[in-house]
C-alpha cells in the first residue's frame, strides 16, 4: 500500500479507517444531561409514516449516521486496492475523494457541527494535497 508515489494517498486511506471508527463512536455516544435525554426521547416518540413502515426520527438520524460510516469504510477499502495500481488512478480517485469529503465538510459547516467538520476537513485536505501532489506525475492515461 505505501508504494512510491502513493504515500499521501495511503496515509489518507488509513485516516479514513480511523475516521470511520471515530464517526461510529461519535454517533453512538448518547447525551447524559437531562436536556439531551429529553431531545432523544422526543425524537423516539416522533413517528413518521413511510410507505411500508412506520419509524421515528431517532431511527432515521441513526441510520443516516451509520450510512456515512459504511460509506467511509467502503471508500477506504477501495482506496486500499487502488493504492497499488499506480499514480494515474491514485490521482483521479484522490480528486473524487476530495470532492466528496469537501461536500461532507460543507454539510457539517452548514449545520454547525464542529467535531466532524474538523475531522472531515482534515481528510478533505489530505486528499486535495494528494491530488495536486500527483498532478505533475500524470501527463496522460497510460
Image (cartoon, rainbow, N blue to C red):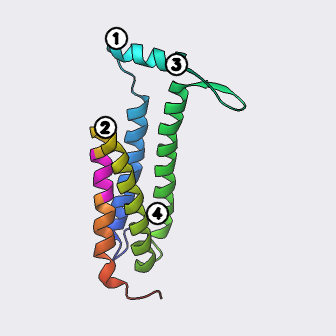
- Where disc 2 sits, the SS reads loop
Find the distance from the CA under tag 4 to the CA under tag 3: 38 Å
- Taking 44 as reference, is 103 left or right? left
Find the distance from the CA under tag 1 to the CA under tag 4: 43 Å
- Circle 2/circle 1 CB separation < 8 Å: no
State the extent of the magenta-drawn residues as a range. 118-124
User: Disc 4 designates what residue?
Assistant: 80
What residue lies at 52% left-to-right and 43% top-to-bottom?
Answer: 67
User: Disc 1 designates what residue?
Assistant: 34
What residue lies at 31% left-to-right and 37% top-to-bottom?
Answer: 113
What residue lies at 40% left-to-right and 40% top-to-bottom?
Answer: 23
* Residue 128 visible: yes
Residue 122: say if magenta: yes
Find the distance from the CA under tag 4 to the CA under tag 2: 29 Å
Q: Nearer the viewer, mark 1 or mark 4?
A: 1
What residue lies at 51% left-to-right and 62% top-to-bottom?
Answer: 78
User: Disc 2 designates what residue?
Assistant: 113
Q: Which of marks 4 and 2 is nearer the N terminus?
A: 4
User: Disc 3 designates what residue?
Assistant: 44
Which quadrant is home to the N terminus? bottom left
Q: Residues within 10 Å of mark 4 (few under 14, many from 20)?
A: some
- Taking 26 as reference, is 56 left or right? right
Q: Earlier in the sequence, mark 1 or mark 3?
A: 1
Q: In this view, does 141 lie above or below 96?
A: below
Q: Which of 114 and 1 is in front in this view?
A: 114
Amino acid at each position: 500500500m505505501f508504494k512510491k508515489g502513493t504515500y499521501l494517498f495511503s496515509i489518507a486511506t488509513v485516516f479514513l479507517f480511523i475516521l470511520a471508527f471515530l464517526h461510529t463512536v461519535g454517533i453512538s455516544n448518547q447525551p447524559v444531561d437531562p436536556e439531551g435525554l429529553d431531545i432523544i426521547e422526543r425524537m423516539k416518540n416522533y413517528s413518521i409514516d413511510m410507505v411500508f413502515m412506520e419509524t421515528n426520527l431517532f431511527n432515521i438520524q441513526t441510520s443516516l449516521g451509520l450510512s456515512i460510516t459504511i460509506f467511509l469504510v467502503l471508500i477506504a477499502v477501495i482506496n486500499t486496492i487502488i493504492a497499488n495500481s499506480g499514480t494515474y488512478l491514485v490521482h483521479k480517485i484522490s480528486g473524487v475523494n476530495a470532492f466528496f469529503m469537501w461536500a461532507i465538510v460543507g454539510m457539517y459547516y452548514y449545520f454547525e457541527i464542529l467535531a466532524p467538520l474538523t475531522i472531515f476537513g482534515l481528510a478533505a485536505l489530505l486528499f486535495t494535497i494528494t491530488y495536486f501532489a500527483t498532478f505533475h506525475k500524470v501527463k496522460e492515461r497510460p
